Amino acid sequence: MDGTSGLATAQDALADGRWADARQGFEAALAEGETAVAHAGLGEATWWLCDFDASVRARERAFVLFRREGESARAGRLAIDLCISYLVNLENVAAALGWLARAERVLDEQDSASLRGWLSLMRGFMSDTPEKAGESFDDAITQGRASGDVDLELVGLGDLGLSLVRAGRVGDGIAMLDEAMAATLGGECHRRDTVVWTSCSMLEACSLCGDLDRARQWCRAADRFMEQFGCPFLNARCRAHYGSVLVRSGDWPAAERELQAALELSQLAGRAPRDEALASLADLRVRQGRVEDARALLALVDDRRLTAMPRATLALVTGDGASAVSLLEDRLALCGDEDVESAPLLALLVQSYLVQGRVERAEQVQTRLQVADHAPGSAAGALCTLTAARLAAARGDVRRAQRLFEEAVDELRRRGAVRDEDLVVLTIGEPLAKPGGTNTMKILSVGDVR
């Protein structure tokens, strides 16, 4: 087989999503003679095979060769791919910034609305403020539509949607993510990695706001893609989010597999994605009642922001309500009560005060949780109802407590967070403290209301 036909065979395998065959074919073609196209194809195939070091090496060489051949547009897009891989897959910010600068240099040589949009997208992704990120994502979407680059438009919609969810505008953000996912899985995109980026944005947003049923529905919608091309969650952090969704929705065997896969992917990256995978795995161990295993995993996590919830729960398990309060208050000081991440922290803080018998302090925290409940589309409403049930029980109003408890659990189930019941209903033992400090109320297991 000559080099030309071998390259064509490799490109056919790449188009079909036969990544191993494509890798073998491109390597064989390169043995016959070096070309930019073969290096670029090898970079894509090895990326899908999660061999990120090999991918960046191949794409770097392809970039050099395309520049020599005067193919500025293809070189610029490769520079963006390299920026993304270094940032997202390898957690190398310095290299990512370097490749972003090279993409800007290419733009100076050949102005392109599409490349300009991808540069805006990456600036938004690397921005240090939500406001700047939002402006950059808006510009990326505009440039994508102006240039006809549907992939840019859809990735921009996903990134902007996630940014809005993080800022507490859950309804607006989720609507954008739904649109991006529908268009991507519906076949509008030209690049398969668009499925990766929009899916990861969707998963993180759903995890943040507690809309796990939506995450499950979109994952089901992606089943056909997964069957043909493999799991789109190639980013260690995204894989950890997927595992977290499975933990909270009750599919613990699958969660175990995904979190272990996230740990394997994180070996090539920096500490941050490894910390997220370890924290999610520790969360699973807490829910499984494997206290010492959870404690050992948490000891490996450097970023304490990720471990506030499982550490606080472990403290409650061992009867240390004061430590639970301290952990949760410290974490809340970093994110603010109106942040979309604050609701589960506040709900557990209410529980921590009640376990100590400090009902008035718990009621003050409940007021803070009601503010967090202003974000439509989040799970804060169910958590707020649940903590209201706990407070009613602590005050001795058992009938009201039982009614509110059932409403909260129904809402959690509707959202797909069937295992969030375990944490918020207290896996810890005797749950609700009365004003006198005695733990006499017993509405502690989901089974009590089923």
Image (spheres, helix red, strand yellow):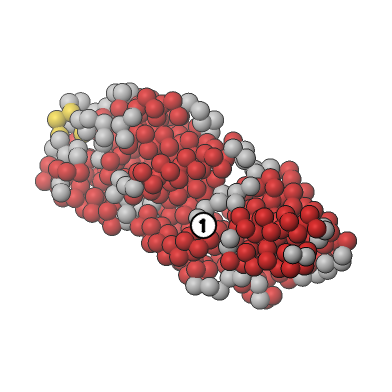
Residue 367: tell me if it is visible: no
- Which residue is nearer to you in this view: 129 or 109? 109
Q: Is residue 272 above or below residue 4?
A: above
Q: Report whether residue 447 is seen.
A: yes
For badge 1, the amino acid type reads Gly
Residue 246, position as x, y percentages in the image = 38, 48
Name of the residue lying farthest toward the front: 1
Q: Please tell me which residue is depicted at 32% across the width and 47% down the height of the picture.
A: 250
| Residue 112 position by quadrant | bottom right
Q: Is residue 261 left or right of residue 401?
A: right
Query: What residue is at 87 percent from the left and 66 percent from the top?
Result: 70
- Residue at point 24% right, 50% down? 409
- Left or right placement of residue 348 versus residue 296 in this view: left
The residue tagged 1 is 230
Q: Measuring from the top left, give residue 72's x and y in whole percent.
A: 82, 66
Nearer to us in this view, 330 or 211: 211
Closer to the camera, 132 or 412?
412
Residue under the point 39% across and 27% down: 293
Quick check: 75 above or below 248?
A: below
Image x and y of residue 135, in percent:
63, 61
Instruction: Left or right? Give the position of 206 relative to 41.
Output: left
Quadrant location of the N terminus in the rendered image: bottom right
Estimate how packed mark 1 is, as few (under 14), some (14 to 19) or many (20 or more) residues with alpha carbons within 10 Å: some
Residue sitting nearer the eye, 340 or 392: 340
In the displayed image of the protein, which residue is found farthest to the left?
Answer: 399
State the image coordinates of residue 137 (x, y, percent, origin top left). Answer: 62, 62
Name above or below for residue 314 compared with residue 53.
above
